[in-house]
Amino acid sequence: MTKKYLLDTNILIDLGRKETSVIKLLEKINIEECEICSIVTAEYFQGLYMAKNINFERDWYRKFIEAGEMKILPFDEKCAKKYGEIQAKYLKLGKLRPLFDLVIASVCMVNNLTLVTKNVKDFEMIERLKIYKEK
């Protein structure tokens, strides 16, 4: 099955918390068409190690990600070039964008995926980045 979506960290976290709105959203777009990227995994683990209930979160991750239900896309050379292009554009304008947001956006763009995030404002200024917006 062709993948269509890249999940942002906030979606992955809320899925682990079994948040109803995220579960409904992923049912709507079909979770089997979703992937995550290595930086989302890194952000997830950062939150995991800061969480009070680390065992619950880790069990959920193991069952869901390590079971192979979702592929983890790497931040590779193509993504690094895309990141450099995007960040350079903003720096030339005197603006600095958050590193992780641009890394996630670059992975999404290189793999021709649509980003699924609750933080649309953090990404909407990135040209040519496809962002899922509920209708």
Image (cartoon, helix red, strand yellow):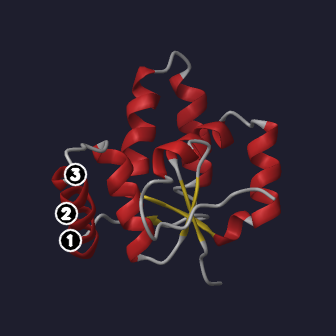
| Quarter occupied by the C terminus | bottom right
Q: Amino acid at mark 3?
A: Leu
In screen coordinates, is 71 left or right of 14? Answer: left
> Label 3 crowding class (10 Å Cα cut-off): few <14, some 14-19, many 20+?
few
Q: Which residue is mark 1?
A: 81
Question: Can you give x and y, in whole percent of width and height, for residue 76 in the image?
Answer: 25, 70
> Label 1 crowding class (10 Å Cα cut-off): few <14, some 14-19, many 20+?
few
Residue at the image point whose x is 34% and y is 54% from the top: 102
Of badges 2 and 3, the one in the foreground is 3
Q: Nearer the viewer, residue 123 or 25?
A: 123
> Label 2 crowding class (10 Å Cα cut-off): few <14, some 14-19, many 20+?
some
Give the numbered dot on residue 20.
none
Q: Which residue is mark 3?
A: 93
Question: Can you give x and y, in whole percent of width and height, for residue 78 in the image?
Answer: 25, 76
Question: Can you give x and y, in whole percent of width and height, for residue 109 in the image?
Answer: 42, 71
Q: Which residue is mark 2?
A: 84
Residue at the image point whose x is 42% and y is 65% from the top: 127
Q: Secondary structure at mark 1?
A: helix
Q: Nearer the viewer, residue 8 or 86?
A: 86
